[in-house]
Image: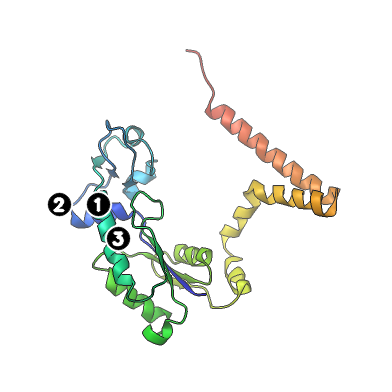
Amino acid sequence: MRLLYLDWPHLPHRLEVARASAPLPELVVIGGQPWEPASVLDASPAAVRLGVRRDQPLGTAHRLAPEAHFMPAERDHYQRTMERALDALAAFTPGIEADADPAERAFGQVLLGIEGLHRLWGDDERLVERVLDVVRGVLPGQPRIGIGNTRFGAQVAAVVGRGRLEKIASGDAGVEAAYLAPLPIRLLARVMPARYFVSSLQTLFLAGDVPSVLVPNVLVLAAMATALFVALTRATRVRLE
């Protein structure tokens, strides 16, 4: 199955910049004013670099970026705009997966099923060109664009492409695995505790006690637990002053 993944990072901020009557400052936080009991919906890239994050209390965001311009979130406007874009994309394929609710973390991300669409719209490059032409007047800025055989593959390709079309060749799981193999993302599996925990369970319940497999996995899990404990102890240390 072929999937086209489009991602407009920080879409609420992009929409505010596009409709502003005057240029917005570099530091922008969207969600309300610092004294309001609300959280951050989005922030400009410059504010993100200072530590401002989505769902962060607005007061915390203000402490991190005191010079930022805080503005209310026009959620209805964001949702209507995304719905317009999805209606336009429906002309290409009924296989659309997206969330028009700006409160969702997937807001700004669109997954299109494009299997067999080359017969109607041409090759991948031509299809992407047509898709971007349709949404360019609705969603501002250049999205990340990736084509793959799975959702994960298409998303990784979009990140690798950095705004230009990046695609994984059509084929089975082996084709996608070969594409992903040289990427640093494959190293993430080595720092996930689940990798070693599942391996230990498989050893215990399927093959019995195999020390050559069980002992290294247990040692790695113990090291990770120790490192996490030390980090939490330092982060939550209470001092009497």
| Residue that protrudes farthest toward the bottom in the picture | 119
Q: Going from the N terminus, do you reach mark 3 or mark 2 first?
A: 2
Dot 1 lies on which element? helix
Are dots 3 and 1 in contact, CB under 8 Å? no
Dot 2 lies on which element? loop
Q: Going from the N terminus, do you reach mark 3 or mark 1 first?
A: 1
Which residue position is annotated with label 1? Answer: 76
How far apart are the two marked residues, 3 and 2, measured between alpha carbons?
Answer: 23 Å
Q: Going from the N terminus, do you reach mark 1 or mark 2 first?
A: 2
The location of residue 220, given as percent across then percent down, is 72, 44
The location of residue 76, given as percent across then percent down, is 25, 52
Mark 2 crowdedness (10 Å alpha carbons): few <14, some 14-19, many ≥20: few
Instruction: Classify residue 234 by image quadrant.
Output: top right
| Residue that protrudes farthest toward the left in the picture | 21
Q: Which colour scheme is used?
A: rainbow
Instruction: Classify residue 59 by image quadrant.
Output: top left
Residue type, label 1: Asp
Q: Can residue 139 be seen in this view?
A: no
The location of residue 81, given as percent across then percent down, is 26, 60
Residue type, label 2: Ala
Are dots 3 and 2 in contact, CB under 8 Å? no
The location of residue 66, given as percent across then percent down, is 29, 34
How far apart are the two marked residues, 3 and 1, measured between alpha carbons?
Answer: 10 Å
Which residue position is annotated with label 3? Answer: 82
Residue type, label 3: Met
For the point 34% across and 53% down, the residue is 101
Q: Is residue 131 visible?
A: yes
Work out whether 197 lies above or below 127. Answer: above
Which residue position is annotated with label 2? Answer: 22
Work out whether 25 lies above or below 185. Answer: above
